[in-house]
Image (cartoon, rainbow, N blue to C red):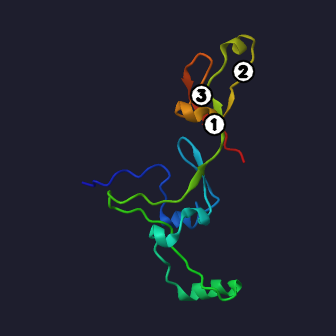
Amino acid sequence: MNNKPAQPHGYLRRSQVITTFGPGALMDLPTQGVLIANLDLWGNPEQQGFEPVLEERLVAKLSTPFEGRKVRLFMPPAESDDPERETQGMRAWQFPGWFVAQYEDAELLKKGVRSRPLVSFRTIKDSKGKYRADDKKLYKVLPIRFV
């Protein structure tokens, strides 16, 4: 039996980080979207324990435009099988910042107007990611994923 916990939403394999979902990529998760941060914000690779890439020819080729300065390459962070070890990962920002609430005002519906409120992330972060309407009930929101 496999005792390894299920991977969280947003878990990426290393090969995905260097192809489809690298820095600047937009990832669509089940309940939100995230924008993968640039490499500068992943932290110091040596302090984070990232494994170095040992490819002398590639390092030599990449050093040429940098006037001979030594270029260091590191693999994307790998998840550890040790449950006691702190989780490693990449920084990402929640995207988008705007949502459409799945709520329609009953008074407007009576007038034949169908409208759903546009809400900011700031207004829903304190209510567990849901929209609090005038009736004090919480309603689900859907992200607007247009760039």
The vertical placement of 94 against 120, above or below, is below
Give the labeled residue for mark 1: 122
Residue at left offset 66%, top offset 41%? 97
Residue at left offset 61%, top offset 66%? 40
User: In which quarter of the view is residue 103 placed?
Assistant: top right
Q: Position of residue 42 (x, y in %)?
A: 55, 63
User: In which quarter of the view is residue 22 placed?
Assistant: bottom right
Asked whether residue 75 appears in the rendered view, the answer is no
What whole-number distance in Å separates the C-alpha atoms at marks 1 and 3? 11 Å
What whole-number distance in Å separates the C-alpha atoms at marks 3 and 2? 17 Å
Three-letter code for the amino acid on which mark 1 is drawn: Arg
Give the labeled residue for mark 2: 114
What whole-number distance in Å separates the C-alpha atoms at marks 2 and 1? 24 Å
Task: In the rendered structure, find residue 74 and report the number of the disc placed on it.
Answer: none
Q: Earlier in the sequence, mark 1 or mark 3?
A: 1
Element type at marker 3?
A: strand
Give the labeled residue for mark 3: 131
Q: Earlier in the sequence, mark 3 or mark 2?
A: 2
Q: For mark 3, does the 10 Å Cα neighbourhood hold few (<14), some (14 to 19), or many (20 or more) residues?
A: many
Relative to residue 120, is residue 87 drawn left or right?
left
Q: Position of residue 73 (x, y in %)?
A: 55, 77
Q: Position of residue 13 (x, y in %)?
A: 47, 62
Three-letter code for the amino acid on which mark 2 is drawn: Arg
Query: Viewer-proximal residue, 25 or 87?
Result: 87
Element type at marker 2?
A: loop
Q: Earlier in the sequence, mark 2 or mark 1?
A: 2
Q: Nearer the viewer, mark 2 or mark 1?
A: 1
Three-letter code for the amino acid on which mark 3 is drawn: Tyr
Q: Residue furthest left?
A: 1
